[in-house]
Structures are given as C-alpha cells and as structure tokens.
Image: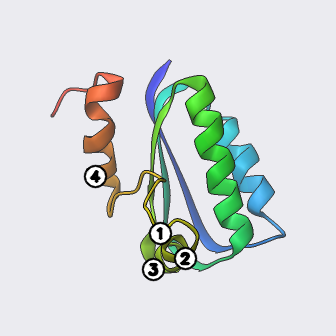
Amino acid sequence: MSPVAIVSANGDIDGTNAGSLTEYVGKTGYCRGMVVDLSDLEFFGTEGFLALHRISVNCARAGIGWVVVPGGAVSRLLGICDPHGLLPTNDTVDRALATLRPRVGLSAS
C-alpha cells in the first residue's frame, strides 16, 4: 500500500467532468493518504464541489486521510459552499503532505 497518492487536475471542473474526477480519485484507493491538487484549475463549478464531497465521504469510509489544495477558482466556491471549512484544505502540496505525514507514517525528510 502506497503511503500517499497525489491527484492533480488543471483546466476546468464542471458538470461534464466532475464525475470523472470522483471516479479517478476512487481508483487511487490503495493508499493511506491523498492530496487532491486543484490549484491550477481555471474554473470550478458546483458539480466540482459535489465531487469533493463524494471524495470526502469515500475517504472517510475507507479510512484514508485526504487534503485538497484549492487555488483561486476552488477557494471562491468553497467560500460559498463550505463556509465553515469542513473539507480539509491546505494552500500547497508540501503543506498538505506535512498535514498527512503523521497519519500515514511518513518521516519528516
């Protein structure tokens, strides 16, 4: 089992491909932690938020720690759809990995 999977997306996440994001992230299930890097997205629609919610539920069921790295487009929508910050976020992949490190048993090298 791999300690951490990093999934990155760029371009747009909308109604045409949000399900693909959820499906792709689900295929990385053989890990103990996951970083979903959405920092390079130019557009992030409400269907993208629903995808993140599904990812969160799936990770919780599987006992996988996860963090999303939002970027501008995602941060704007999270400010509306997740005003209490319930989804785990961090501003860089390195910081997200540092957040997951204790949970997945990575050394601080």
Q: Mark 3: which amino acid?
A: Gly
Marks 2/1 in contact by CB < 8 Å: the verdict is: yes
Q: Measured along the vertical axis of the image, is residue 99 above or below residue 106?
A: below
Residue farthest toward the top in the current orientation of the protein:
1
Q: Is residue 54 left or right of residue 103?
A: right
Amino acid beneath label 1? Pro
Mark 4 and 1 residues: CB-CB less than 8 Å, in contact? no
Count of numbered tags? 4
Mark whose residue sits in front, 1 or 3: 1
Answer above or below: position of 96 versus 9: above
* Residue that mark 2 sits on: 80
Give the residue at mark 1: 83
Q: Which residue is mark 3?
A: 72
* Residue to which mark 4 is pinned: 94
Residue positioned 71% across, 49% down in the render: 22
Residue 62 picture location, percent across and down: 60, 24
Which label sits in the foreground, 4 or 1?
1
Q: Earlier in the sequence, mark 4 or mark 3?
A: 3
Do callouts 1 and 3 mark residues in contact (Cβ within 8 Å)? no
Quadrant in the picture for residue 98: top left
Q: Nearer the viewer, mark 4 or mark 3?
A: 3
Q: Secondary structure at mark 4?
A: helix
- Quadrant in the picture for residue 81: bottom right
Q: CA distance from mark 4 to mark 2?
A: 26 Å
Earlier along the polypeptide chain: callout 1 or callout 3? 3
Question: Given the image, on which type of amino acid does mark 2 rest?
Answer: Ile
Alpha-carbon distance for marks 1 and 3?
A: 15 Å
- The structure's colour scheme is rainbow
Residue that lies at the very extreme toward the right in this rendered image: 16
Where residue 91 sits, quadrant-wise, is bottom left
Q: Are marks 4 and 3 in contact (CB under 8 Å)?
A: no
